[in-house]
Image (cartoon, rainbow, N blue to C red):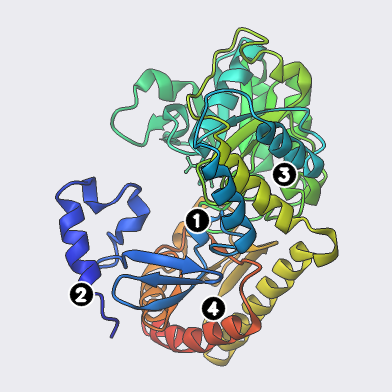
Amino acid sequence: MLNLTKSTQAFQEAQQVLPGGVNSPVRSYQNIGFAPPFIASAKGSKIFDIDGNEYIDYIGSWGPMVVGHAHPEVVQALNQATARGTSYGAPTLAETALAKKIMTSYPCVQKIRMVNSGTEATMSALRVARGYTKRDKIIKFIGCYHGHVDSLLVQAGSGLATFSTPSSPGITAGTAQDTISLPYNDIATFRATMQKYGPEIAAVIVEPVAGNMGVVLPKDGFLQALREETSHYQSVLIFDEVMCGFRASAGGAVKKYHITPDLVCFGKIIGGGLPVAAYGGKNEIMQVVSPLGPVYQAGTLSGNPLAMAAGLATLNILTEPQKEYQKYLETQTTKLLAGLQELAKELAIPLITHQAGSMFSIFFSEQDIWNYDDAAAANQIAFKEYFKIMLENGIYIPPSQFETLFMSIAHTNADIEKTLSAAKKALLTAKKFL
Ligand SMILES: *Cc1c(COP(=O)(O)O)cnc(C)c1O
């Protein structure tokens, strides 16, 4: 049994001052029944809690840590930047450097604006799309998460292709009413909705590889249909690549699926573990952004020099040409999932494994998973038990099957072997709950 004595104590203390003891809900282990490990430090593929437990980390701060924790080059870049002062609120060379670095991998991005969180990126991209098209309504897909933006924190009303209802108190019905929620991967429903509302639609926003209902891949033709209809009705197509950027492939989903969106949102990896996100795209659209145009968007700490340094160092490492890290990440992920499938087969457990580059997830399900309903129908109790045994055996994965796991370049073959030997025990336990 895992010793979490100090973490349990720390969690009690935290609960007295932070809602639920955390600053972001998923960290609280609310559905798990014990305190989350409080983290003391992390290095490479490992993360260490205050009780002295060591884990192989597949959360990677929910995506950013693609070069592993405390990579010496990132640490050095940060130390150097810190010594020069932590923020000036004025232009720096590092902002242009990171912008250019991102654009090298995403040629469809002609102008980019740095912000501080993925939420801010999608919120701003929507405002830009609305300002540019002078339209109000947007389409999003059920199970895609785009941060806690009011108009995106909605769920489908009853029936398909209806206007949405708020999925959190604090969001006005008026806000929710401008959002249409549609099932992911349902091309016919999307086309029919565009036929009806196309001229009123400012933007269609999508996770081109979904990662917030577990990993769910786009069906053949789905992203193509989004591109065709938005072009036809002159709506702005927004790819939210906050998670899948630099993960689904070296050029994210844009490169993997050869679909060019109008705007792209970035986050997670581009900050290398510091709070950075961005939105960008076609010149013609980005020209409406203040101070060039009338759409206001600003940030005291946007383009922060420490954040730019960490992001740039991370992308520089990841894209070192001789190293072929993207290939390595993908191969290692495939290896791990093949090992899991083999174990599942031995134990006669129905297991679905999904991968896009270095992001992956598993579902205890006999049927294919193409949308939120499919994901929700998978056996989450079995997943919870699987999670607990993995943690006990030193494998740090998200406490929910609706979250994505991430490979880093620091994960070794030995890590994968250790993960698979833990998974053997965890699957055996999960089987009892199927
Ligand atoms: C994480 C995430 C966001 C939100 O980013 P934050 O930095 O947490 O606000 C938005 N979109 C996607 C696809 C994400 O995975």
Question: Which quadrant does the N terminus fall into?
Answer: bottom left
* Image quarter in which the C terminus is found: bottom left
Give SS at disc 1.
Answer: helix
Find out whether the residues at labels 3 and 4 contact each other: C-beta distance under 8 Å: no
Q: What is the three-letter code of the residue carrying label 1?
A: Trp
Tell whether circle 1 marks a residue whose Cβ is less than 8 angstroms from ligand 1: yes
Sooner in the amino-acid sequence: mark 3 or mark 1: 1
Please state the horizontal and vertical placement of residue 228, each as a whole percent of the image. Answer: 79, 31
Q: Bin the neighbour count of mark 3 within 10 Å (Cα to Cα): few under 14, some 14-19, many 20 and up.
A: some
Viewer-side label of 2, 1: 2
Q: Amino acid at mark 2?
A: Thr
| Residue bearing the label numbered 2 | 5
- Chain-order first, disc 2 or disc 1: 2
What's under tag 3, amino acid-wise?
Phe
**Mark 4 highlights which residue?**
350
Query: For the view shown, which residue lies furthest in the right direction?
Result: 322
Query: Label 2 vs label 1: CA separation?
Result: 25 Å
The residue labelled by disc 3 is 222
Q: Is residue 264 above or below residue 196?
A: below
SS for tag 2? helix
Q: Nearer the viewer, mark 3 or mark 1?
A: 1
Image location (x, y in percent) of residue 424: 49, 88
